[in-house]
Image (cartoon, coloured by chain):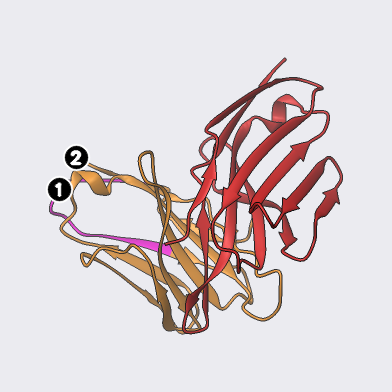
Chain colours: A red, B orange
């Protein structure tokens, strides 16, 4: 099946930039997503990028896509303590018969040090 | 608040029992997805329904089943429960037509099997 890999932990100081990395396997993926999960909560969609784009910026969030290397990153500028959460990368892939599914990485736990 | 609701929030039951988890999608969303989140397996796709019909199956055990009703709410039935079924179960919904095909997640049901 499809595979999405992420590092499990990242620790940054408040005010610094955070960069969370992800690699995926399906070269035909059309959309890639970043979700945020705070303790005890569901997944919140942060942003997404279409596979024909290299970069997408949305306020403090910047998504970079290297399609050749199948590498996706999420940069959070001016990281705040409220950004502490688990961040999931997900790819949308064709699972056959016109059906599309999401495969998620295991998540990167971001800890922000005040 | 994503607009997706799930009940109950917590469920504690014994091995061998059967439970039903309920999900109401966002208004207008026709697709419902069920996911299981556990520490060792991460977030695993279980099953998808679209407008009342099963659309795709993922890593769903035969002891588990789901359905989507005419009012579009969905139920996930888990039977002959085992300790290893303890996990967070998420429901997500999406509008099928048009990109970026994002899925919106409910707050989850935490199932504890003792």
SS of the residue under disc 1: loop
- The answer to which quarter of the image holds residue A18 is top right
Instruction: Write down the residue under mark 2.
Output: B114
Q: Can residue B83 be seen at all in this image of the molecule?
A: yes
Give the percent coordinates (x, y) of residue A3. Answer: 48, 54
Range of residues picked out in magenta: B10-22
Q: Quadrant of residue B2?
A: bottom right
- Quarter of the image where one finds residue B60: bottom left
Q: Position of residue B110 (x, y in %)?
A: 38, 45
Name the disc covering residue B15, or none.
Answer: 1
Task: Give the residue displayed 43% in from the left and 63% down from the top.
Answer: B34
Marks 2 and 1, how far apart in space? 6 Å
Residue A88: % across, % down: 58, 46
Tell me if A85 is positioned left or right of A1 in this view: right
Please give left or right for residue A37 compared with residue B113 in the image: right
Residue occupying image coordinates x 70% and y 69%: B100
Q: Which of marks 2 and 1 is nearer the N terminus?
A: 1
């Amino acid at each position: 099946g499809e595979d999405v890999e992420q590092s499990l932990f990242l620790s940054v100081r408040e005010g610094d930039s955070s960069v969370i990395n992800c690699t995926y396997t399906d070269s035909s993926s059309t959309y890639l997503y970043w979700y945020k999960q705070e303790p005890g909560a569901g997944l919140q969609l942060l942003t997404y990028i279409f596979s024909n784009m290299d970069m997408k910026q949305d306020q403090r969030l910047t998504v970079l896509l290297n399609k050749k290397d199948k590498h996706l990153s999420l940069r959070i500028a001016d990281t705040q303590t409220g950004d502490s959460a688990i961040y999931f990368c997900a790819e949308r892939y064709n699972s056959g018969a016109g059906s599309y599914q999401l495969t998620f990485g295991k998540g990167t736990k971001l800890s922000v040090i005040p | 608040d994503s607009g997706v609701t799930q009940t109950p929030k917590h469920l504690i039951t014994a091995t061998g029992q059967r439970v039903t988890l309920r999900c109401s999608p966002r208004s207008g969303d026709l697709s419902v997805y069920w996911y299981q989140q556990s520490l060792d397996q991460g977030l695993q796709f279980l099953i998808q329904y679209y407008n009342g019909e099963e659309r795709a199956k993922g890593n769903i055990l035969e002891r588990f089943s789901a359905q989507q009703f005419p009012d579009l709410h969905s139920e996930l039935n888990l039977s002959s429960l085992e300790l290893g079924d303890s996990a967070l179960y998420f429901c997500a919904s999406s509008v099928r037509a048009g990109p970026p095909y994002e899925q919106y997640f409910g707050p989850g049901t935490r199932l504890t099997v003792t």
